[in-house]
Each structure stands twice: as structure tokens, then as C-alpha cells.
Amino acid sequence: MKSITTIDELEALYGEPLGRSLTKEIDHSSDHYRAFIEHAPFVVVATSGPEGLDCSPRGDPPGFVRVRDAKTVLIPDRRGNNRLDSLKNIVRDPRISLLFLIPGVGETLRINGRAEIVVDDDLAATFEMQGKRPKSVVVVSVERVYFQCQKALVRSRLWKNDAQIARTALPSTGTMLEALDETIDASTYDQNYPEHLQKSIY
């Protein structure tokens, strides 16, 4: 087994990048890329900090990631579990990467840039949902934007109905928590979770 340890070895193994893979990368949100962002109800946020890397899902109705201008996008930070992994990373290392997905669409869109956490009541008010405002808004300065082709989603069959599995095929949330904390009763947790979700989603 051979490990690749240099860029030269890597490039020798894979060859030159396809021209189209470089052409599609720009330093701003074009009108076409903006349309993709505004239709996406889901984005994966990747950050880096002293403790390591973090990758976190964010979701809301399409358009929740707002394109303020060609070089700036805004992401409301909705209520979560207060681990604050992504936000702690941003405070110490502003580099950020976003991966947008749209149900039924094979392409994904990526943004790389730098982020800051902004607290502004007027801005937060524009992101209000169900009477709740985000405590902060992540402001991303766009440095690189490009779309990814359909291969990964086609191979995974991500949007195919017959690729879905029943949630009961996996351990429930309560079951996983009970295995880690004996004070938690799995059946009680699972029974109460739908109501908790409705009360705490915003």
C-alpha cells in the first residue's frame, strides 16, 4: 500500500484538471449562482478551529441564505443545541466553506470565503420566523464560487424515492442517547421529541 505524500505524486496519479472544472470557478455570486443559492433550503457549513474541523447542517425555507450582493451572503443562526462549534471556529478562524443542496437537483454549489458573526436587531428582524429572530447572522464574504457536477448525487441516488430507507431501520435518537447516558429513557425521549421539536424549532 502506497501513501501519496506530495502534490507532484497526486497530480501524476490523477492528471490535469478538466478545463471546465476551472472555468466554472469565479470570485462572486453570478446571477446563475445566485438563483441556485436562493432556491436552496439546505446548506452544509464547514469551519476550522484550534480543536479541529466542523461540518454542520443548516436548513430553512428556500432563500434563507440571503445574497446581499455579489460578494456577500447572509446566514441566520437559528436556535440549536448551544454547542456553538461553528460559531466558535469562526471567531478564531474566519475561513468558511458552504455546500448548497436543492432537493431533486443533481448539481451542488460551493462557496469558499471568510465569515464574521454579526449581532444587529434590525438585520435579525428580517430573518424572523414564527415570531423568533436569530441571535446572530453569519456574514460570509465570498472568495470562490463554483458548482459541482451531478456525479456524486447520481451515484448515491440521493433524490430517488426507492433509495430511501425507513427511519426504524436505524437506532432512534433516544436509543443512541440512552446508550451514552443511562439517565435517559429512550422510549420516553422518542415519544416526547416531536412535541419538543415543534416548540424549539425556532
Image: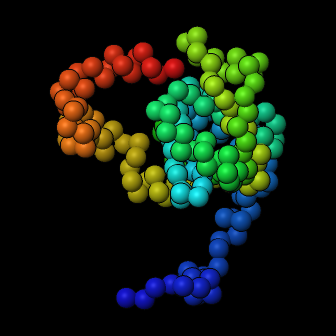
Location of residue 36 in the rendering, given as x and y in whole percent from the top left corner:
65, 39
Snapshot quadrant of residue 116 = top right
Q: Is residue 136 visible?
A: yes
| Quadrant that contains the N terminus | bottom left
Q: Is residue 172 visible?
A: no
The residue lying toward the viewer, choosing from 92 and 44, is: 92
The residue lying toward the viewer, choosing from 67 and 199, is: 199
The mark tally for this picture is 0
Residue at screen point 45% across, 20% down? 200
Location of residue 128 in the rendering, given as x and y in whole percent from the top left corner:
63, 17
Q: Residue furthest top?
A: 131
Residue at screen point 66% across, 34% down? 75
Snapshot quadrant of residue 135 = top right
Decide: is 32 above or below 81. below
Residue at screen point 32% across, 20% down? 194
The residue lying toward the viewer, choosing from 77 and 60, is: 77
The residue lying toward the viewer, choosing from 153 and 132, is: 132
Snapshot quadrant of residue 165 = top left
Q: How is the image coloured?
A: rainbow
Location of residue 107 in the rendering, given as x and y in whole percent from the top left corner:
56, 49
Would residue 37 appear left or right of 161 to someone viewing this image?
Answer: right
Decide: is 3 above or below 144. below
Location of residue 100 in the rendering, given as x and y in whole percent from the top left corner:
58, 43
